[in-house]
Each structure stands twice: as C-alpha cells, then as structure tokens.
Image (tube, rainbow, N blue to C red):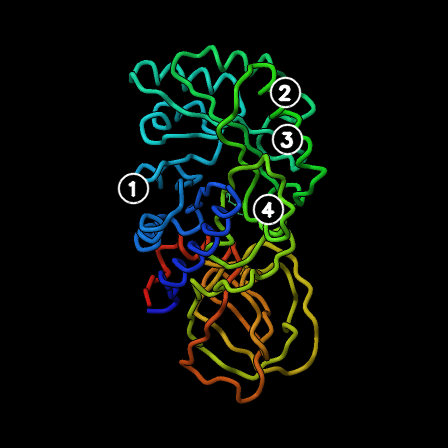
Amino acid sequence: MYPKVIIDPKKYAYNVDFLTNLCHKNNLSVMAVSKVFCKDPRLLDVLEQSNIDYIADSKLENIMNMKTKKTKVYLRIPAMSEASLVVRYTDISLNSELDVIYKLNEVAAKMKKRHQIILMVDLGDLREGIYYDQFDLSDVEKIYQLSHIDLIGIGTNLTCYGSVIPTIETYRKLKEIKDQIESHFKIKLEIISGGNSSSIPMLLAFELPKFINNLRIGEAMILGRETAYQKRIDHLYEDVIVLKTEILEIKDKPSYPEGVLGFDAFGNKRDYVDKGMIKRAILGIGRQDIDFNDLLPIKGINFMGSSSDHLIIEIEDGQYKIGDILTFKLKYGAILSLMTSPYVEKEYV
Ligand SMILES: *Cc1c(COP(=O)(O)O)cnc(C)c1O
C-alpha cells in the first residue's frame, strides 16, 4: 500500500562505515544517532554490525527497546521524572542540570549501579547546556563528589536551535572549559563530544580541533549530507530512505479558488496565485505524515498545498497518469515524520 518508504540497509551501512572510518582515522569516537528512524529494526541492525562506538537516541523509549551490545547514550537531557529509567536502561546520559544529576545519583545508588554523564556546555546555539560564560568549576566539584555518578566528559551541541556553525572560534570556548576542568582537578576528561553532523565539514577540511575526540552523528549517516552548509558529502548515498506515493487524481482546474475565501483545512488564511488553468494532481499523502517542504523537488512539479491526507501538486501536461507512483528524496524532517507514522508502509530493498 502507498504511501510507503523504501529503506536500503546496505546504503545505510555504507554511509555508516564511511563516516565511522573517517572519524576513527581522525581519533574521534562515534556515537551513531538513531532517533530519526524510530527504532527501525533493520537499520538498528546495521549499527549493531558496524564499528560505531556508541548508539545514541533522544527517545528513552527507543533505547529501552534496543537489544544492543553497544554502549547506549541518552541524548536528550533527562527529565527529573525519568531518572530511574535513564539509569536502568542507558549507560551514558547528556546532562546540564545539577538537580537532575543528584537525582540520577540517588537512583543509581539505590540500584547499586554507576551512571556515566557528559556535561553539556552551550557555546551560543542556545539549546541545552550550561552557558559557557556561566560555567562554574564548583558545579563540577559537586558532581565529582557524587558516589554513583562518573563524569566522563563534556560536550556541546551546535546548529540546532541557533543555527550556529562550528568554527575554531566557537570551539575555543569549549577548549577553555576543558582546560580549566583538567588543570583544576588534575584529571584527563575521557570524552570531549564536539557536536553532530554539522561538524563534518571541519573534519573533512582537517580543521576540527584536536582536543575534540567524539562526534554524535545522525543525519549525515542517513542522508549523506552535512548540516552546517547542507551539502552532500562526496561518496555517500542520499537515498537510504525514499518515499513512494501514488497519484489519485489529475484534472485541469483553475489555480485560484472560486467563491468567498475564509480559512483552509488547518485554520490558516492563505494567499493563492492566479495563473489561470493548470494541470493539478493529488497525491495520497498529507500533513499527518509529511510537511511537503521536506520533500526534495522533482523537475516539472510544483507543490501547491496539502491537507491531512492529500498533497496537491501542479504538473506538466502529459507528465503523469492516474495510478503513477512518484518517488521523492527526503530531507531530515521528512524521514523523521514518515518513519514515525503508522500510516506509511516500510519496505526494504
Ligand atoms: C539529534 C542529536 C544529534 C545528531 O544530530 P545530527 O544533526 O542528526 O547529526 C547529536 N546530538 C544531540 C544532542 C542530538 O539531539
């Protein structure tokens, strides 16, 4: 049944191996990030068979259901309310709140377990982490005093909320914090986790600072694309997952609606461009499963709009017929929503 996604585990394996080798050659360990494909068993199996060092996900539920021998990393900073699940089901979590870290320590002590944490530092992207300017060694001191928590390193996340691209200048702030911790406590931090797929351009250009020894990579593995400049990475597949969807209707109709205009199906006032009669097709997929802005364009088609279950496109004369299947390459958001939707069939090459 359509819509469906076609998943090619071999292409994914190729991308994963390529990036893992690249990282390992540059003395970086790899946390492969699985959150975008919603615990797809075949893709998880690819990670399991690969040389990645850690498997990382931002949904606790995904991690809880993983059968893996890899070290499991919880990417989203833990909620106070899930502390005991985090300690039970994950090996490492990324953290930024002392109170939550105390709670993790408390439940770890009860379970007679140790829990490892990476302390997140915000270098200006303004999502999670202690703002670098307010970093306080006494917080680190407090963490070191906890009986069942191991602070194994520090990390940062870039190009998420604030679109901040990794640069030498930005990383200098992280290096200062690393140096402060290491010289004050006379230790060597095991992990300096420098970022995600947006750090790959620096790595490819041999510009990634040497003190960084770990990256957390999701998008580049699944889409063959880095996220600082949204460029394809040479040699990698960008079609590990594609969407196939069917044409339900093709009609010649006006481009401008007729009658008194109010709101569309989602309560929005819209502007419509009047360009006369056009050839319109309806695809059997809608906003419940996808935002059409996350589909890569196909030559000759123009996205007009969508409702819950219909996507309306303008096509060229004679380009398609009823029942034709269109194949779309995807952006990150599309993979996220399609893989999460129970209405989209999953098929493997
Ligand atoms: C999602 C996520 C990543 C992976 O980001 P990509 O751009 O997909 O490589 C890394 N770190 C954290 C904390 C994340 O939430």
Quick check: is the Cβ at mark 3 less than 8 Å away from ligand 1? Answer: no
Secondary structure of the residue carrying numbered label 4: helix
Residue drawn at point x = 40 percent, y = 55 percent: 339
Q: Nearer the viewer, residue 236 or 319?
A: 236
Q: Where does label 3 land, which residue?
A: 174
Task: First in sequence, mark 2 or 3: give its number.
Answer: 3
Task: First in sequence, mark 2 or 4: give its number.
Answer: 2
Task: First in sequence, mark 2 or 1: give its number.
Answer: 1
Indicate which label's residue lies in the foreground, 2 or 1: 2
Residue 31 location (% of width, % of height): 45, 42
Residue 87 location (% of width, % of height): 35, 25
Quick check: is the Cβ at mark 1 less than 8 Å away from ligand 1? Answer: no
Badge 3 crowding class, 10 Å Cα cut-off, few under 14, some 14 to 19, many 20 or more, is: many
Q: Left or right: where does residue 75 sit relative to residue 2?
A: right
Q: Where does label 1 land, which residue?
A: 68
Task: First in sequence, mark 1 or 3: give its number.
Answer: 1
> From mark 1 to mark 3, how far is it between C-alphas?
31 Å
Residue drawn at point x = 41 percent, y = 30 percent: 92
Q: Nearer the viewer, residue 36 or 180?
A: 180
